[in-house]
Amino acid sequence: MKLENANYERVILAIERLTSSNPKYCQCMRCRLDVTAISLNSLPPRYFISPSSMEVEELASPLLMVEASVLHALERVAQCPHHERPEAKNITDNIKKILEKAKEKDIE
Ligand SMILES: [Zn+2]
């Protein structure tokens, strides 16, 4: 017997579907886990003891509700990821490159 959350699989599948169709969402493990945690915390608790006589499908929250919650979590994590934003990193890298080139020119 084990304790399971009936929404877990739905959340994972929704993240998979929504991130693969929209490249603006980071697919790294940290962001995925953050989105999973936020989504599961915002959905109503759906814990059950497995094996159960009921199907996971009957126990889980409605698909639309899960997708809405995942989308909300994706937006939140995209706005404030637990790592440097890719765009921000590119800008810093570009500035570094420009500064390096400027130094090379000074030496010449
Ligand atoms: Zn990420």
Image: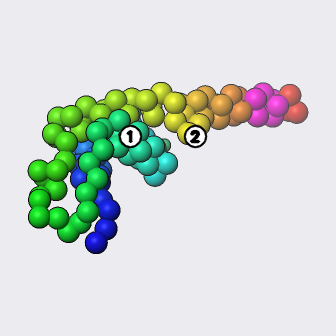
Mark 2 to mark 1 CA distance (whole Å)? 21 Å
Indicate whether 104 appears above or below 49: above
Indicate whether 43 appears above or below 48: above
Q: Which residue is mark 1?
A: 41
Residue 11: numbered disc? none
Tell me the quarter of the picture where residue 50 sits.
bottom left
Q: Position of residue 46 (x, y in %)?
A: 26, 48
Dots 2, 1 in contact, CB < 8 A? no
Quarter of the image with the C terminus in it: top right
Which residues are the magenta region? Answer: 99-105
Q: Is residue 29 magenta?
A: no
Residue 83: numbered disc? 2
Judged left or right of residue 102, residue 19 is: left
Q: Position of residue 44 (x, y in %)?
A: 28, 39
Disc 1 crowd rating (10 Å Cα; few below 14, some 14-19, many 20+) is few
Q: Is mark 2 within 8 Å of ligand 1?
A: yes
Tell me what residue is drawn at x 11 percent, y 58 percent: 55
Tell me what residue is drawn at x 76 percent, y 29 percent: 99
